[in-house]
Image (cartoon, helix red, strand yellow):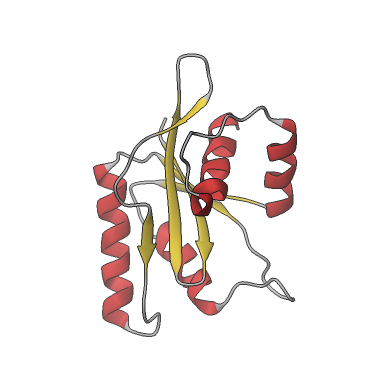
Amino acid sequence: MKICGCEISAQEIRLAVCQLDDDGAPVMKPIKQTRIEIKDDNDDAQLSACLDEIRAFSAEHQIDRFVIKSRARKGRMAGGPPTFKLETLLQLNESTDTRFVHAATLASFGKKADIDYPEKLPIYLKNAFLVAAYGLKQ
């Protein structure tokens, strides 16, 4: 199974595609596109283009499931409107299943699980990789 871990921040989705190796450890697949961004979330054409980009990404990498790190809905750490639109666009991709993982659950998993992060993993993809690893282990 191929899982795409997603962390949504501001107006972009950070992507890490992983699957389990023969030993049952999550392995990140090398991909060229690690972000999907939307400049103006009030522009219908850009929202439609972003959905098309998500669908193309999913098909190209044969993604079975998107797993998204949930964000607060209200309060100091709440996500802004663009982040919720990006979540919705991921869910509208009919060819893949979409699941969410709460930030506290992910933090606990990161502490308890013995996860080997890939060498040269960019800092901005660390959470996306952890989300994908969590999705694979569930």
Across and down, in percent, residue 77 comes to: 70, 71
Seen at 29% across and 41% down, the residue is 61
Q: Nearer the viewer, residue 14 or 51?
A: 14
Picture quadrant of residue 36 = bottom left
Counting from the top left corner in percent of width and height, residue 95 is at 33, 47
Q: Position of residue 102 (x, y in %)?
A: 67, 52
Q: Quadrant of the N terminus?
A: top left
Q: On the picture, is 45 further left or further right than 34?
A: left
Question: Is residue 105 visible in the rendered structure shown here?
Answer: yes
Q: Which of 86 and 13 is in front in this view?
A: 13
Is residue 93 depicted above or below 116 in this figure? below
Q: Looking at the image, which is closer to me, 78 or 85?
A: 78
Instruction: State left or right for residue 119 relative to residue 134.
Output: left
**Placement of 16 over or under 89, stated as above or below:** above
- Residue at 37%, 35% in the rendered image: 29
Evaluate whether residue 99 shows in this view.
no
User: In the image, what residue occupies the spot 45% across and 14% down?
Assistant: 22
